[in-house]
Image (cartoon, grey):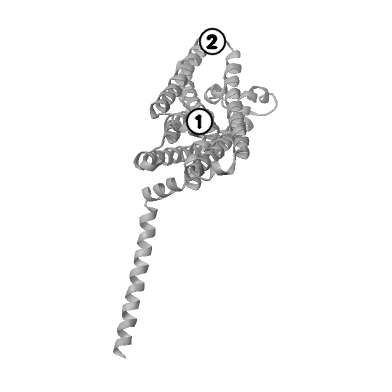
Amino acid sequence: MASTNNTTLTLQATTKINSDEGYAWCSLFVAEALFIITLNTLTMVVFLTKPTLRRRSTYLLMNLAATDIGIGAFVMPISIYRRGNAYKLWKVDMAYECFISSYGIDLFFFGCSLLFLVSISIERLHATTNPFRHRLISASTYKKWIAGVWVASAIYTSFTVAVLHFNLLGLYMWYIVAGCVLVSILILCASYVAIFFAVRCRKQPETSSRHARKERNLTVTLAIVTLFCMTVWLPYVLFTFLEIKLTKKFSEEALLRVRNVCEVLFFANSFVNPILYTIRMTDFKKAFTTLIGCNHFQSGIYNSTDEEHSEGMRCSQMTFNLR
């Protein structure tokens, strides 16, 4: 969800703003972008190379990771550019058409991210309430749903950019955007509340199978992911739509600092998901640690320890024989 005040970041800056602070914020955002790209790329590699993880349910997770890569590779550089202009680290004017286009990039990837989170919540709700029917859903159905998410986000982005470019609806456009975000959040909340009650009311024998336990663990993991996303999104969304009113009470420097904090939290959502997968999903953790070489390092330590132990035993045996 891009902000209404990105023109403020691009076009307005006061001489009171500290440039050293600007370098610190830009460096933090660069590090965060690299972290997002690296972790989510590794996540994609793990899902693609580990057959046991390439289930239909993980198709949505793979596309969510792809969306996060887009945020780190395209959205965050634009954010860093605007922030550098705001702190007068550089002065590169952006034409209005370019600004609207950059807003379209923001909206497209954030829209995909939100839609995939909503899709995951609905998919988990169906898997919890109708486990047998859920197993019958074909892979092609998932692929069509995923393609629909990308296409829907592209259509919505194109519509919003066109409306902003020609200034057709004015401030009403922001109410439409806010309404879409609110509806998505309500769907997320309703889905996981329904999942909670479905799990509580379910009979124990149905949840005793290994497959049911894995499904329940995946549902809890994705619920944590969604809860964290909503937690870090909320300050950013509220600040975005309240900033016009806050400008009358606070200085530009104070508002810029608040926006920086909100965006750091907001973008953190894109690299926390792989960390949560590693903590909660055993198969993913094993594949991820193997990919980055942790298992090789640990096995090397264990092998060297075993060799030293064996060598010590041989020496002790030789000494005993000599005696």
Residue 102, image x, y percentages: 46, 22
Query: Is 174 on the left or on the right of 141, as rendered?
Result: right
Whole-percent x, y for residue 38 in the image: 41, 41
Residues at badges 2 and 1 in contact (C-beta under 8 Å)?
Answer: no
In the rendered structure, which disc, 2 or 1, sits on the residue that comes first in sequence?
A: 1
Q: Which mark is residue 123?
A: 1
Q: Nearer the viewer, residue 98 or 294?
A: 294
Q: Secondary structure at mark 1?
A: helix
Q: Nearer the viewer, residue 204 or 230?
A: 204
Residue, disc 2: 167
Vertical relation: 296 (above or below) 304:
above
For label 2, the crowd category at 10 Å Cα-Cα, with few meaning under 14, some 14 to 19 and many 20 or more, is few
The residue under label 2 is which amino acid type?
Asn
Quarter of the view holding residue 172: top right
- Name the spot of residue 307 as percent of width and height, x first: 33, 69
Residue at position x 65%, y 29% in the image: 251
SS label for mark 2? loop
Q: Residue furthest front?
A: 205
